[in-house]
Image (cartoon, rainbow, N blue to C red):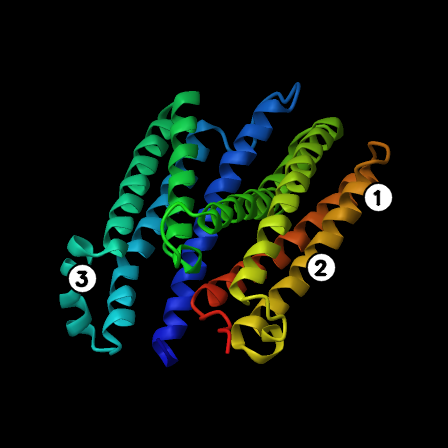
Amino acid sequence: MTGSILLFSVLLTAISDCAYVLAVGVMLASYWLDRVEMLPARPVFSAAYTGKWLIALGSLIGLAQIIRLWFLAASMSGVALFRQNLALVPSIVASTHQGLLWKVQMGAVLAFLASSGVIARRKSRAMHFIGVVCLCVIAFVKAASGHAADNGDFTRQEMLQWVHILSTAAWAGGVIVSGLIVLPVLVRSAAGEMVWQYLQAVSKIATYAVVAVFVSGIYTADRELNGMFAGLFTSTWGRILIGKVVIVLFALVLGAANRFLCLRGDVSTHNITLSGRLLRVEAIAILVVLCLSGWLGNTAPAMEM
């Protein structure tokens, strides 16, 4: 795909990825808020509010996957004719490996929407668990649909890519939802000690997730560059990766400063305010990373000469 088709494909991937990451973040935020001691009332992400968010994000993921079929047809046909590619969609869904993966993913999306509908009506741990399983399936299909699946299904590369997607979503989703949605409301409506507990929970999970992101990400980048690090500077894929890594490192510096300078200090208004600001800037940086990831996913890795 080239030109405007590539641009729209990148935008579609970025929107879908952001919706997925936010869904993971909402799940995590709901869990963390449940663990905050003595929180008198949940000012954000009550059962009904959580369910509505998840329904909206799940619908966006499903819509993006439906539209993605046309782009899949365009990549296979090599042309940008709308009707011609649309006519290919039924055969792609019925008789190709990508079509099978699409059906599995849409099944997971529909199950996620159903569980979210129940969550919107009442608090249910079972429905939360089902929702988490659906998000894991969606991540696995994404791993199985990309470059990591070039050598077959259920390979080590594919499993590592699955871990990479899940850990990225846990880190990015937790930071974005907490920094931009939960924390501003929590600061206005809860005691400082409760906000502190929430920040500690975010930082702990983010740290574990970042370790998994880097281990799996380094392996994936080395494999797709075929061990030729010169490809980082001579290919479009490599240059996008460099930009992504630079912003990821910036986000990591912010996260480290938050964890080791703010959250290891005393519970104070100054530390809570500074921690919240660092978390918001980190969230914005991660949003940029997600957009670059969408571009990276639609670009062929460097090929060995």
Q: CA distance from mark 2 to mark 3?
A: 41 Å
* Residue 44 showing in the rendered view: no
Q: Secondary structure at mark 2?
A: helix
Q: Is residue 57 above or below residue 12?
A: above
On the image, the x and y values in percent for residue 159 come to: 47, 45
User: Residue 160 at x, y = what percent?
Assistant: 51, 47
Residue 261, which numbered label? 1
Foreground disc of the pair 3, 1? 3
On residue 130, the disc is: none
Q: Amino acid at mark 3?
A: Val
| Kind of residue indicated by mark 2 | Phe
Does label 1 or label 2 sit earlier along the sequence? Answer: 2
Q: Amino acid at mark 1?
A: Leu
Taking the image as shown, residue 298 lies to the left or right of residue 229, namely left
**From this viewpoint, which residue is outermost toward the front?**
305
The first of marks 2 and 3 along the sequence is 3
Location of residue 232 by image quarter: bottom right
Neighbour tally class for label 2: few under 14, some 14-19, many 20 plus, Cα within 10 Å: some
Q: Between 75 and 182, which is closer to the camera in this rendering?
A: 75
Q: How many marks?
A: 3
**Quadrant position of the N terminus in the picture:** bottom left
Q: Taking 14 as reference, is 102 above or below it? A: above
Q: Is residue 284 left or right of residue 56?
A: right
Q: Residue furthest top?
A: 38
Pointer 3 residue? 89
Residue 104 appears in the rendering: yes
